[in-house]
Image: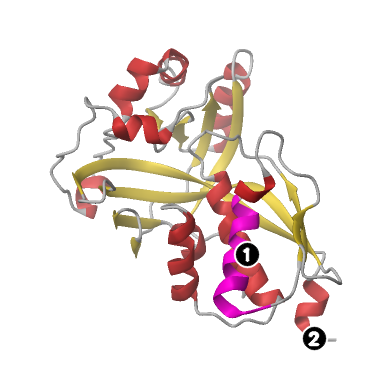
C-alpha cells in the first residue's frame, strides 16, 4: 500500500500563529500594506482530516456556521490546488475547530495551508513548497507562513520569509468577545503607516511594537480591557489586528497561574510557542 493510501483519514494539525511584533512601513499602489512582523507558531491547533471519495466533489463534513462553504478557505485551497494541477480527485474535509474565528491567530489561513500541503501529498501532485506558498498568497497574506512551517521574520505583505528562532515560551492568549475586522483596521485614517524599518536584532532586544494597537484599542473596548487584565501578569501584546491578546511566560507554572485567574473572566487559551510547525514534523 502506498504511503498516501495509509494517510487518508489521518488527523493533521493546523497551528495557530502569533505576531510577536507588527510594524507597517508603507503602502503599495494596490492598497496592500507593507509590513515587518515576526510570526511564531503554537501548539494550539485546529485538526483536519481528509477522507477519500469516489467522486470529484470537494466538500466539508460539517460546514462552519456562518461561513458559506464556497467562501471557506479550506474549500478554496483544495479547489485552487486542483485548478493549478488539473487534478480531478475529490475530498471530504473534516475540521475540528479549536482556534477562535476573528481572533488574529490565523485559523482560516492555517487550515488553508494544511489543506494545500496535505492534499498535495495525498493527491500525489508533487508541487514544490515554493509553489504552494505562491498559491497560498492568492488565498491570504498569512497562508504562506503556515506553508513555510517555521517561525519567521516577514516583510513585504507578509510573504518574504526568513527563518528566526525566538524563545519557545509558554503563552496565555485571551479572546475578547468581539470580532475585529482586519480590513476595517487597515482602512483607518489614524493607522500608523510610516514606521521606520527595524532589524531582527532590534526585535530580539525588545522592540515588540504593534502599529495596529492604538486603533484597535480605540475601536474595541474589550480588547483594551483584555490587555489591561493580562498585563498584570506579563507584557501583554496584540497579535496581528486582534482580537486576541497574548503574553509570554518563562515557565509553564507562571503561565498556568495566569491562565487560571484570567479564566474566571475571559475566554483563555494556554499554549506553547513553537519554531517548527507540528504539521512540518508530520510531513517529513
Q: Is residue 5 above or below residue 243?
A: below
Give the residue pinned by disc 1: 79
Residue 86 is covered by the magenta coloring: yes
Residue 270 appearing in the image: yes
- Residue 56 rendering spot, x and y as whole percentages: 77, 70
In the rendered image, which residue does mark 2 sit on?
A: 2
Which stretch is magenta? 73-87
Quadrant in the picture for residue 182: top left
Lateral position of residue 61 relative to residue 276, left or right: right
Q: Quadrant of the C terminus?
A: bottom right
Query: Earlier along the polypeptide chain: callout 2 or callout 1?
Result: 2
Question: Which is more toward the observer, 72 or 228?
Answer: 72
Residue lying farthest bottom?
1
Helix, strand or loop: magenta stretch: helix
Contact between labelled residues 1 and 2, with CB atoms less than 8 Å apart: no
What residue is rendered at 48% in x and 66% in y?
Answer: 135
Amino acid at each position: 500500500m502506498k504511503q498516501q493510501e495509509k494517510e487518508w483519514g489521518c488527523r493533521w494539525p493546523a497551528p495557530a500563529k502569533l505576531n510577536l511584533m507588527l510594524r507597517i512601513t508603507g503602502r503599495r499602489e494596490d492598497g496592500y500594506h507593507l509590513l515587518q512582523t515576526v510570526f511564531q507558531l503554537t501548539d494550539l491547533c485546529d485538526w483536519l482530516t481528509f477522507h477519500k471519495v469516489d467522486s470529484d466533489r470537494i466538500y466539508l463534513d460539517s460546514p462552519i456556521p456562518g461561513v458559506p462553504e464556497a467562501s471557506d478557505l479550506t474549500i478554496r485551497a483544495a479547489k485552487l490546488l486542483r485548478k493549478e494541477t488539473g487534478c480531478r480527485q475529490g475530498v471530504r474535509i473534516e475540521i475540528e475547530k479549536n482556534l477562535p474565528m476573528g481572533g488574529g491567530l490565523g485559523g482560516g489561513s492555517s487550515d488553508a495551508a494544511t489543506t494545500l500541503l496535505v492534499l498535495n501529498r495525498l493527491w500525489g501532485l508533487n508541487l514544490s513548497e515554493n509553489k504552494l506558498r505562491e498559491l497560498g498568497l492568492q488565498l491570504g497574506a498569512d497562508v504562506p507562513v503556515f506553508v513555510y512551517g517555521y517561525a519567521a521574520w516577514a516583510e513585504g505583505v507578509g510573504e518574504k520569509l526568513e527563518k528566526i528562532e525566538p524563545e519557545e515560551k509558554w503563552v496565555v492568549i485571551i479572546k475578547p468577545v468581539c470580532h475585529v475586522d482586519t480590513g476595517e483596521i487597515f482602512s483607518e485614517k489614524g493607522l500608523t503607516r510610516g514606521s521606520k524599518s527595524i532589524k531582527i536584532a532590534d526585535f530580539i532586544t525588545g522592540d515588540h511594537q504593534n502599529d495596529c494597537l492604538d486603533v484597535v484599542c480605540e475601536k474595541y473596548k474589550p480588547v483594551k480591557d483584555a490587555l489591561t487584565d493580562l498585563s498584570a501578569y506579563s507584557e501583554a501584546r496584540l497579535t496581528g489586528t486582534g482580537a486576541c491578546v497574548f503574553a509570554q511566560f518563562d515557565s509553564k507554572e507562571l503561565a498556568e497561574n495566569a491562565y487560571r485567574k484570567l479564566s474566571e473572566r475571559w475566554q483563555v487559551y494556554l499554549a506553547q510557542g513553537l519554531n517548527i510547525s507540528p504539521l512540518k514534523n508530520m510531513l517529513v
